[in-house]
Image (cartoon, rainbow, N blue to C red):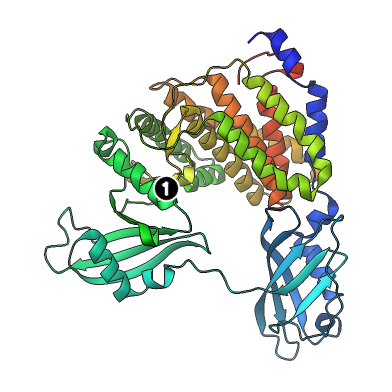
Amino acid sequence: MSGTTQRHALPAWATILDSLDTLARLPAWLERAADTARLTETLRRSVPEFTSGALALHKCRSKHLLLSRDGASWSGTYYCTVADPSTTQQRSVALRGVLRPPHIALPDAAGTPTPFASDAWQFVVPELRLAFQMQPPETQLDALAELTNPEQARVLLEQSMERQIASCHPEVLRYHPGLRCTIGYHLTYQDADSSHQSLPPFVVAKTYDDERGRIAYEGMHALWVSPLGASTRVAIAEPIAYVPERRLLVQGPLSEEQTLYALIETTLQTQSATSRAQLNDYLRKTAIGLAELHSSGVTIGALHSWEDEMTKVRAFVAPLTTAIPALAPALMPLFAYIEGLAVGSTPDRQVPAHGTFRPAQVLLHQGHIGFIDFDSFCQAEPAMDLALFMVALVDFGMSSLHAMHPSIPDEGLHRVLEEQLAQLDAIADTFLAHYTAVHLVSRQRLGLWKALNILELVARSWDRVKPARLKHTIMMLERQLLSYGSEGSPHGTF
């Protein structure tokens, strides 16, 4: 695609900068909903039990704020640390807070007062545009009770594994309420020595609220019987069974000392030559392992194109423009710019792709690596996995560095973020160099996927009310778009 075509296709660079400037700062009313100091101070002078001194509020912090799918409100959990002044004994009270944008009316605050922390307690704080109530019980996955019961789980695993199991000890490893749960099972067997290769003493089961377990099982099974299953460079867990009626995936274990995320964090903290060398070695192994996955020849899995990804990101952003209509004219030029860059570019051949490949999906153990979480397995351009991994690496690193240095003065913040971003981009480029040494990828296509991934991260910073994350994701997006030149005139490649 020529420079002339790009100049006609792309919005002016000044328009892009205006869009980035609009997106770079959350409105004050939205930031207040996640500001611990402001929340605490406002509730102290609003809730009757705190104003009267019947209870002392030490701190209120928000967690897991999330925009609703219809864009009508944000909701999340608010943890209040309170104490009875007569005893000074502290306790935590979990509230559900619902935040309404300014153009949507707050619920009526009138009603019969009830004591704070009682089941029927509700309270509206107009200054924060927040309506509070007691946090309702977590939504449980249908199969969770059965899967955490030792005897019921033993019977289920016997049936799915077709082995006589003598004992079963469940251990919840990860749980996302109402969405998915990962459970480890320590097993002994009746019919054979449990050290036998086909009788693992420990298995992992994952249950989902949708069909991702089936997708993971089918993808892992195809990979297990492909050349990747016998690879000495990267391990994947053996897929043992899938139980459709319980949406349950059963798989063998993978050894783990830490994730690649943890090693990245350690390297950033210590800045030691030893950690950097270890990280570079694991990045090389990860890149080679990913190239093996992409070259495995597996043909199952839904097709996922760059256009599919664009549609997905647009759908994700839609509720945000409903909640804050002023964002729509800022986002439109960014989508148009990225789509304009795609005109005339030729996609790479689709390959078996992990689908959600991030450093958290890479397990490290005594110099070896393993890949986990294949529940988005698909057929896609190699740039899909590469872009997501590189963008996630930089985003995680920036968030970690900010957590390490939370008190950087505003006047020096931009310079520090630029330096950190350059350091992390160099780490991501090291990974890419190791990958391209064994498997080719179009740099232009990689840039398109990266730009789209970063734009989604910017939207997620609004969606989840993360002002600190928003600062660096805006910088990441501007840096990525600049790599193709200003005003549609390229001075380099992505």
Q: Height in image: 168 above or below 102?
A: below
Which percent across, then down, holds residue 99?
A: 77, 61
Q: Which residue is labeled 1 in the image? A: 373
Q: Amino acid at mark 1?
A: Asp
| Between 131 and 287, the one nearer to me in the picture | 131
Which percent across, then down, holds residue 447?
A: 59, 25
| Between 220 and 228, the one nearer to me in the picture | 220
Q: Is residue 155 left or right of residue 405?
A: left
Q: Height in image: 54 above or below 294?
A: below
Q: Is residue 86 left or right of residue 102?
A: left
Residue at coordinates 79% horizontally, 64% vertically from top-left?
Answer: 37
**Residue 128 in view:** yes
| Between 368 and 214, the one nearer to me in the picture | 214
Residue at the outermost front position:
245
Which percent across, then down, holds residue 59?
A: 73, 71
Give the quarter of the image for residue 107. bottom right
**Residue 420 in view:** no
Residue at coordinates 44% horizontally, 45% vertically from top-left?
Answer: 361
Residue at the outermost left position:
192
